[in-house]
Amino acid sequence: MSSSSESANEIKARLNLETSRIHWHDLQTYYARGHVVRVAADGELH
């Protein structure tokens, strides 16, 4: 969880470090179990 003093830019930077692209083959098992969240390329994570 983020602290209340963490700025929006700091949160965005942290999330960018914690996420990445993945090949579909590696993602299939998680997708089949319903453990995937898809975000549009222009989507915002709030």
Image: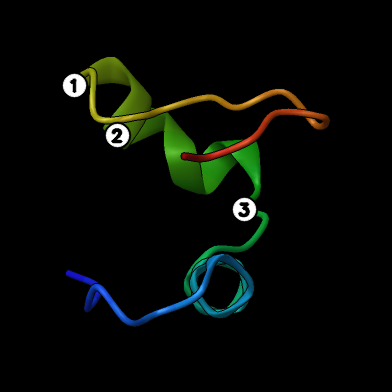
Pointer 3 residue: 22
> In which quarter of the view is residue 30 placed?
top left
Residue 14 vertical position relative to residue 27 in the rendered view, above or below: below
Q: In this view, does 28 lie to the left or right of 42?
A: left
Q: Residues within 10 Å of mark 2 (few under 14, many from 20)?
A: few
Expressed as whole percent of the image width and height from the top left, the position of residue 28 reads 43, 30
Pointer 2 residue: 30
Expressed as whole percent of the image width and height from the top left, the position of residue 44 reads 64, 35
Q: What amino acid type should be assigned to the residue bearing mark 1?
A: Arg
Expressed as whole percent of the image width and height from the top left, the position of residue 27 reads 46, 40
Q: For numbered disc 1, what is the local secondary structure? A: loop
Q: What amino acid type should be assigned to the residue bearing mark 3?
A: Ile
Pointer 1 residue: 33
Q: How far apart are marks 2 and 1 (CA)?
A: 5 Å
Q: Residues within 10 Å of mark 1 (few under 14, many from 20)?
A: few
The residue closer to the viewer here, 25 or 45, is: 45
Furthest toward the front, the residue is 5
Q: For numbered disc 3, what is the local secondary structure? A: loop
**Residue at x 64% of width, y 73% of height:** 9
Expressed as whole percent of the image width and height from the top left, the position of residue 17 reads 57, 79
Q: Label 1 near label 2: C-beta < 8 Å?
A: yes
Q: How far apart are marks 2 and 3 (CA)?
A: 12 Å
